[in-house]
Image (cartoon, grey):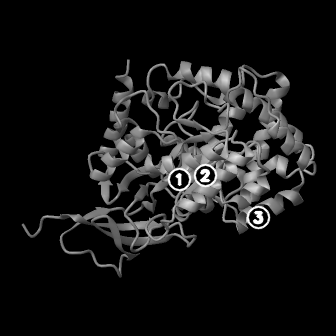
Amino acid sequence: MGDTPRRDVQAYVGATVIDATGAPPRPDQTLVVRDRTIVAVGPASQVPIPCGALVHDVRGKYVIPGLTDMHVHSESETDDPRHFASLYVANGITAVREMWGRPRLHRIRRMIESGQLLGPRMTIASPLLDGEPALWSDVPDSPIVTISSPQQARRAVPEAIDGGADFIKVYSRLGPEAYRAVLAESHLRGITVAGHRSDHVPFLEQIESGQRSFEHLFGGIWPAASSDVDRLEAAMARIETTPEFHLGSWLKQVSRVEWDALASYSSTRAASIFERMVAADVAYTPTLAVHAVIDHPESVDADDPRMGYMVPGTPESWDFLQTQIYCGGGRSEEEVGRHRALHGWRLATVAAMDEAGVRLLAGTDCVGPGLFPGFSLHVELELLVAAGLTPMRALQCATLEPARFLGREQLAGTVEQGRLADLVILDADPLDDIRNTRSIDAVVVDGRHVAQPERQELLAAARRIAGGVQ
């Protein structure tokens, strides 16, 4: 009996540890996990293996922190929460920030925390707080709170807190007085605000307002960085809300303002904006993966093998969303060319923000067209590197920076003693090629070791669940 390995103590022996602190990789390390916590990590010659520990030989492999997707929408046409949870874990995603609060997400989180379901740690937003008409008002049963007055704003915040929200999600059409009331009430109640920028409030004011993170690279930075800022921010505020107004018509109008703004873009003004973001400790989640699809809708492949993890009918629904929402009913040849150019500007803007020291967070905006839960975070990392970040900085955007943003830097985000045991074990070096984050051998979630056979079963289960939906 004394020789039986203890499942609550595990030793990972021989790997190269990339701890995500920015330190160089450390080869031939031993990492000891007791229950849910890393209790030792160091050279194999110096870290003893506890008696009876379950030993994992990981020589030739690379250990990184578990990955975080900081912008997801875990919606599914299946009723089985294993669908999304399995895809996240199988892809090394050990934490997610849910950007649209729904009661079902809170039930799923309780299942994960109680051990009923293997899944990532979840940080869950409030329902969307938007102006009137809201951008998603044409979608039935969407959890949206439309706000047209400061009084409504002040009621919406405590109601969201009572509903279990971890933070308040603000959206694009909030009017100036409502937006300011949301920020004031949230500050009073000690809850974080994140989300879109308001079309109706100058971006520099929003940076100073206390909103902690901004999502996506549309509508905000370029008008504010223009030498013609007053006219362009006024153009954002004047976006036309016709009877057919919805996200698609909004996106089409925003792209016109963006294109106009680039003609008078000032790198000096942009640098000043980034400096103010750093000073205000404001983070940015560029979601390059979704912009790649919006700017290049032809890149979505209906024959992508990952379609097997999505429910039947996904290609048709994605085609509708691309045509009617992303492309606003269709694009002229001129608009197609503009979007190709805009995507290059988005990459360049991310590079400039990183160089200025802006805190960047990796997020995907799953599960829209061309985006696959879990899988697409690896695409986001590749796009961050394509924008000019080093592989280490891109990796930090999905590990260290989310932990810092969420106030968990003493618990998560790095491979260090005292941190929670959320780990990804890779077959190849991600600092040599960021695409190697896909080469997953095993995942450790809250101390639970998910070896390759179980990982493959998670993927197979997600495929079966998706295929079983009629």
As drawn, is 20 to the left or to the right of 83?
right
As drawn, is 316 to the left or to the right of 308?
right
Q: Do residues under tags 1 and 2 come within 8 Å of each other at their CB atoms?
A: yes
Label 3 sits on what residue type? Arg
The residue lying at 60 percent from left, 56 percent from top is 185
Compared with 399, 372 (above or below) is above
- State which mark lies toward you, 3 or 1: 1
Work out whether mark 3 precedes mark 1 in sequence or the reverse, and give the earlier one. Answer: 1
Q: Which mark is residue 452?
A: none
Report the residue marked by disc 3.
Answer: 276
**Nearer to me, 93 or 238:** 238
Q: Do residues under tags 2 and 3 come within 8 Å of each other at their CB atoms?
A: no
Label 1 sits on what residue type? Phe
Q: Residue 334 in the image: state x and y as whole percent.
A: 85, 26
Report the residue marked by disc 2.
Answer: 194
Q: Secondary structure at mark 3?
A: helix
C-alpha separation, residue under disc 2 versus residue under disc 3: 17 Å
Q: Secondary structure at mark 1?
A: strand
Q: Which mark is residue 167?
A: 1
Work out whether mark 2 precedes mark 3 in sequence or the reverse, and give the earlier one. Answer: 2
- Mark 1 Cα-neighbour bin, 10 Å: few <14, some 14–19, many ≥20: many
